[in-house]
Image (cartoon, grey):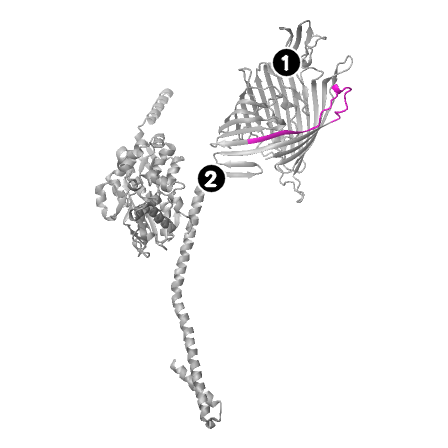
Amino acid sequence: MSFLKSTALFTTLMILIALQPDSAKAEVTLLNVSYDPTRELYQDYNALFAKYWKSKTGEDVTIQQSHGGSGKQARAVVDGLEGDVVTLALAYDVDQLYDKAKLVPKSWQGRLPQNSSPYTSTIVFLVRAGNPKNIKDWDDVVKNGVSIVTPNPKTSGGARWVYLAAWGYALKKYGSEEKAQEFVGKLYKNTAVLDTGARGASVSFAEREIGDVLLTWENEGFLILKEYGGNEKFQIVTPSVSILAEPPVTVVDKVVKRHGTEKVATEYLKYLYSKEAQELAAKHHYRPRDAEVLAKYGKQFANLELFTVDALFGGWKEAQEKHFADGGVFDKIYTPGR
Amino acid sequence: MKHPRMWVLVLTVNSVLGADPALAALDEKKFEAMERRLRELERRLEVAERGNRNIIAAPSAEAAAQPAADERTVKALDQKVRILERKREVEQEVAAENAKKTPKIEAGSSGVKISSPDGGHNLRIRGFVQADGNFFMDDSTQGTTPQNRTNIPDKFTLRRARLLLDGTLFKHVDFRFAPDFGGGQARLFDGYVDLHYFPFASLAAGKQKAPISLERLQSATALLFAERAYPTQLAPNRDLGVVLHGNISRLGSTAQYGGLHNFNDVITYHLGVFNGTTDNQAVQNADTDRDDDKEFEGRVFAHPFQHSGVSVLEGLGVGVAGSWGQPFENQLANLTSPGQNAVLSYANATSANTVRGANVITNVSSVTSSGDHYRLYPQAYWYWGPYGLLGEWVLSSQGLHGTRTRRIGNVTHVRNDVSVRQDNTAWQIAASYVLTGEDNTFQGVRPPHAFNPFASTWGAFQLAARWSELDIDDDTFRNYATAQSPFFLANPQTSISRATSWAVGLNWYLNANIKLMADYEQTYFEGGKAGTGTNQLADRETEKVFFTRFQYAF
């Protein structure tokens, strides 16, 4: 073979290799920036989605996770953490991505069904086995001598749900904002430790054995039962009234456009509404949106009266400004130290 | 409890009865008394027993309750300890998080530095003040008339008072803003931005030191003598423009950005385009230019033996700089002696008016820099332990354009129009030695121990000596007109054609911030003074000046 021919052949081979379809070499990576208690859910969901995506497109997808207090995670994304998707604890934190950096459109919440919340949860009590302080409802946690563990509403999305759940209960029972403020004030006076996130609060209560009651996500309560010795050590107490927590999800538009991951990221979130993903959410004790799946797993979710943020507080923006902004109600009622 | 009581009773009776052998003889009265006494003893015994029971019974009840109380206390204490521990952890977590957002402020002998938490942005506030005293010697009694006496006033002066605001933005953009208030003027000395994404190719724009003279590039706080030598006068001072610069480290290591003028790496280079300035042009606030032609300036400087292991040569730096431009009728600046007195002044003057009939006659002469102007500037230094040597030589070649016109009434008559090439040269060699043994460097001397007479520490002392010469092209002093009405580009009776200076100095670095300087410099001139008789030219008197400086830099 002449030099020219061999050169031409080599060049042709190189071009063919270079022009191979993307699918043969494609591998895509997503970063899911989420809040504290979703670690276990998304570990399982990522595997489920990767399998689904591979079968659908032939593409390998690796999903990395980042977890922390919801508010802190939102700030990290605003400050440059390149999350392709965010799955945070509350809509207000996702709104920050629009307000502070225009990373998502203002109407992000309307892009997926049910306000972009593929699963819900609520706030329950976790007490020590035998319920030594006889805690049955919100009034019991504000009694003298009860030591509460819950995260800090300034840094934790779950904590804000706790705060609003308590406020909503008091408002409904005692009928006035003043009484509600007094009630929530008592609650935080009884709080032994304000962790920065829900997972930290779980560690304080379950591992460090601090406090009589942990106010936390329903799914986090079940996770503690599973991880820390079950009913022999703890038990879940469901209050008469609590809040319907709707953790939202969205694609971070500017990031996925830069990464070229818009399609897979969007599909990653849409698939959360599938039967398989809803079952997975239920197994992790998140309340599924899918009625059939909810009915199937209905026994594990206690019946209680649930109110929404919109109904009682006029939406997250109003709730945030009134209660959690600097100088807001929380700053007035919470005095560090006991 | 019965038996003990009985035994006590019996023993008591026995002891009472047994105490007296004449029991049989006791009468009834005595017996009754004894009986009363016995009852009394019995009562006392009962009381004592009751007391004993109480004493025994009470501790038993407390003891029974104690374990439960202890357990409660221990549990409460345990909770408190756990809560405190956890709170401490949470506080540490919050503090660590806050630390990421809290700016870092450092203040010390190097000024104030404010840094963003990630270190990507910072602002450094520094400055220095130089308070000088210049004393001229043998200058007050010369001259036969008040007009030609050479008395030069001794004076205290604020030579420099400069604020240095340096900063970094986004890790790779540096800036400097440096106003100066010395000499009774407010001037901006430096104002530039330097993009240094790649250490080998950074781009600076703004007002900055021109990359020509080695001694000019040395910080004013690190100078050996109060005034720089002649070569810096034949180079630009500050100039406005854009410069590409970079530094290259030894093979196998990565160069680090070290500022616009870096003396840390094996090779540094500068290539710039500037408005251009004339020789010894003072720093000025105006940023005008007279023409479209710009001045190109370049410099390359190397430490060829850096990291060679030959310690005696590691501090050797050699380089060459040069410039080329085509100024158009640029005003020329005076050159000065070490005592900052003008020694070369070009013929820019309007002569006294003369009335001829009804017409006013005005003579105007002007000399400017026009046409090609280039400089060649080889330079070197060597530092080894306490020894230091710095030398540079410069050729500044410029086109001079001189005109002299006479205006009679409203009519202008050009009488002289001269264009010549002026080649001026200057050089210096300066040696220094740190008496106290500290390292001598281009950046100055840092005493390891600050001056403290109570602890017998004296800072650092440095001896310095310098020889410097300036030679002005002879064509500058040629008469381009007639003997009766001569026209010089620079009047040889007032401007010198050559200056030779030697200087010695002692510098005392009290600490990293304070430096005291005492220099003596003597300068011999050729020309620069009117002679007597047919020889109309004489040498200007030798300038002897004693400089002192109190410098504070932070």
Specify whether A299 is left or right of B271: left
Q: State the residue position of label 1.
A: B367
Q: Can the viewer see residue B509?
A: yes
For numbered disc 1, what is the local secondary structure? strand
Identify which amino acid the numbered label 1 is placed on: Val
The 10 Å Cα crowd at callout 1, few under 14, some 14 to 19, many 20 or more, is many
Q: Position of residue A167 (x, y in %)?
A: 32, 46
Image disc number at residue B102: 2
Q: Amino acid at mark 2?
A: Thr
Residues drawn in magenta: B137-164
Task: Classify B356 as above or below B78.
Answer: above
Q: Nearer the viewer, residue B29 or B438?
A: B29
Horizontal and vertical percent for residue B271? Answer: 54, 22
Taking the image as shown, residue A241 lies to the left or right of residue B330, namely left
Which secondary structure lies at badge 2? loop
Q: Is residue B11 magenta?
A: no
Q: CA distance from mark 2 to mark 1?
A: 59 Å
Percent coordinates x, y for residue B282 in the rendering: 61, 22
Instruction: State left or right for residue B458 relative to residue A88.
Output: right
